[in-house]
């Protein structure tokens, strides 16, 4: 079955190269989860620069995915969370944080201050370019969003463009 998806992506890439297909790949053309995790890892690191969380602040991570064409919020996988903890050891799943509208976000276990970073869903242009949105908020203190374009370079995903989005 893996060969069918690979063939389909190859045909789509060929058609795109001929100018006969374009846009973003659909959910049925999704890349492996490990590739999505690698993209989100690069976005997480870029977003940390924007959010500037102080060393003691907990980082609560929300991952947006598309299921049946609808966007859903959820926790990062254990594998992704482990990757993110290499950049930020106190990263937590969003479900481990306490969020109340208009109140500061905190780590549910310790009560420590927290910032929420949300990322995704990842849209694939092809197997070496991706686009996603991400943002951060500190409870009732506003929300900041960015659109990220990424490319695979030398085997690693790199942010090639970041565009500031909504500030709420």
Image (spheres, rainbow, N blue to C red):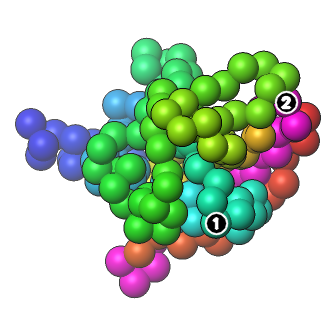
Q: In this view, does 103 lie above or below 116?
A: above
Residue drawn at the location 66% of the way across and 25% of the way down: 99
Image quadrant holding the N terminus, namely top left
Q: What stretch is highlighted in magenta?
A: 139-155
Q: Where is residue 5 in the image (x, y as percent from the top left)?
A: 22, 41
In depth, the one of 101 and 156 nearer the eye is 101
Residue drawn at the location 82% of the way across and 45% of the way down: 144
In the picture as drawn, the residue positioned furthest to the front comes out as 110
Q: Where is residue 119 in the image (x, y as percent from the top left)?
A: 58, 43
Residue drawn at the location 46% of the way across and 79% of the way down: 153
Residue contact between numbered discs 2 and 1, judged by CB atoms under 8 Å:
no
Asked whether 152 falls inside the magenta stretch, the response is: yes
Image quadrant holding the C terminus, namely top right
Q: Where is residue 136 in the image (x, y as percent from the top left)?
A: 72, 45
Majority secondary structure in the magenta region: strand
Q: Distance between the residues labelled 2 and 1?
A: 21 Å
**Relative to residue 106, is residue 153 drawn left or right?**
left
Mark 1 secondary-structure assignment? loop
Asked whether 146 falls inside the magenta stretch, the response is: yes
Report the disc number at residue 55. Answer: 1
Q: Where is residue 124 in the image (x, y as percent from the top left)?
A: 48, 48
Is residue 70 visible in this depiction of the protein?
yes
């Amino acid at each position: 079955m893996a060969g069918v998806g690979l063939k389909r992506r190859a045909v789509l890439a060929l058609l795109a190269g001929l100018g006969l297909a374009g846009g973003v790949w659909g959910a049925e053309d999704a890349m492996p989860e490990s590739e999505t995790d690698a993209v989100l890892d690069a976005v997480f690191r870029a977003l940390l620069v924007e959010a500037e969380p102080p060393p003691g602040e907990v980082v609560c991570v929300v991952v947006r995915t598309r299921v049946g064409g609808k966007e859903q919020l959820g926790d990062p996988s254990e594998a992704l969370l482990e990757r993110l903890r290499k950049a930020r050891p106190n990263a937590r799943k969003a479900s481990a944080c306490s969020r109340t509208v208009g109140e500061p976000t905190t780590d549910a276990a310790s009560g420590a201050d927290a910032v929420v970073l949300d990322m995704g869903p990842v849209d694939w242009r092809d197997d070496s370019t991706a686009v996603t949105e991400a943002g951060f908020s500190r409870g009732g203190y506003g929300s900041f969003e960015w659109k990220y374009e990424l490319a695979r370079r030398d085997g690693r995903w790199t942010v090639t463009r970041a565009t500031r989005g909504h500030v709420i």
